[in-house]
Image: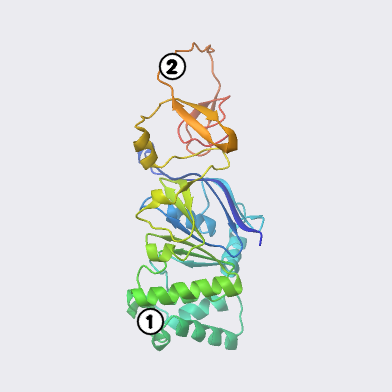
Amino acid sequence: MGTLLSAKNLYHIYRSRTEQASVVALKGVSLDIDKGEYIVIVGPSGSGKTTLLRILGGLMRPTAGTVLFDNQDITKTPEEDLTMFRRKTVGFVFQEGNLQPDLSAFKNVAKSLSLNEVPYQFRKRRTLELLKTMGVAQRKNQLAVRLSGGERQRVALARAMANYPELILADEPTGNVDYETSVRLLELFRQLNKDLGMTFLFATHSNHVAGYADRSVELRDGLFLGQHGRDIDLTRLDMTRMVVMDNDNRVTFPESIIQQIETKIGTLWNVEVLEKKRIVLSPIEEWSEVEIETKETIEIKECPVCREKNASNAKSCVKCGAKF
């Protein structure tokens, strides 16, 4: 069906006043999402999942890298145009819900439609349909602040789907609802995906949520570690992991593989390519020192991502790995 979204070399640094306290949340992440796909991002807390979702949805700009949405570079789109893009194209559901506490459940959903100048009668009908589907129609007049956590999550999901977005982004979409409600919601997502071709990208820790996806991508420490197909088991990721080579020809080996080969950081490997696209890695036991001719004066250039000083002929940053 074609590519809906293409992210290339995304870096994001949360800067602090001291360089030592800055956090590199994403370290060159690349991801393509086809129209109509149902994808989940899995990984431990702090791996960069929420940051990635926010950047892909245009809620944040990356420190470096690009995001193309239907071939439009949203990382360079003016903020006013980006606001319209978010309203019409992307539905968001984050753990905190982000409902307006002083508005009723009905008005929280209907407002997203009114911002797109949808006529009142259609707004009313669409809002009631969604609240009924989510099982909170009887709470339509309650202020969001008086709803339970599960009810707020269901209202947030209704609001996210109100404008028939091309892409739904959700961070733990069923995290605040009971199992029965989560099953109903996940079945609904799958039905919308199948019938309307709506694209879903979720971040989750849940086996149940991940089990509905067409594929899962595994994020750890700001890098994609691998990919998984259907019926993923988050407790046995080593059994289904397909290691990813990104567009910079980098392969990140899972920790379990590193443990099995009993290597250490800085170990050198010889790479031999065999027939049928198989490769063999052999550790090099000894390495003779090579004299390197240096110049007395070396020109310096600053990394645009982390601001580290690098030699002028460097092709990537010695600190964060960003490409020049």
* Quadrant in the picture for the N terminus: bottom right
Alpha carbon of mark 1 to alpha carbon of mark 2: how far? 69 Å
Residue at image position (36%, 30%) is: 263
From the image, tell me which residue sits under label 2.
Answer: 287
From the image, tell me which residue sits under label 1.
Answer: 143
User: Which residue is farthest front?
Assistant: 275
Out of 296 and 254, give the one closest to the viewer.
254
Q: Position of residue 136 (x, y in %)?
A: 41, 83
Q: Is residue 206 left or right of residue 85?
A: left
Out of 261 and 69, give the one closest to the viewer.
261
Q: Is residue 164 visible?
A: no
In the rendered structure, which amino acid carries the disc numbered 1? Leu
- Element at label 1: loop
Label 2, residues with CA under 10 Å away: few <14, some 14-19, many ≥20: few
Asked if 58 appears above or below 226 in the picture, the reply is: below
Q: Position of residue 39 (x, y in %)?
A: 51, 60
In the rendered structure, which amino acid carries the disc numbered 2? Trp
Asked if 247 appears above or below 216 in the picture, the reply is: above
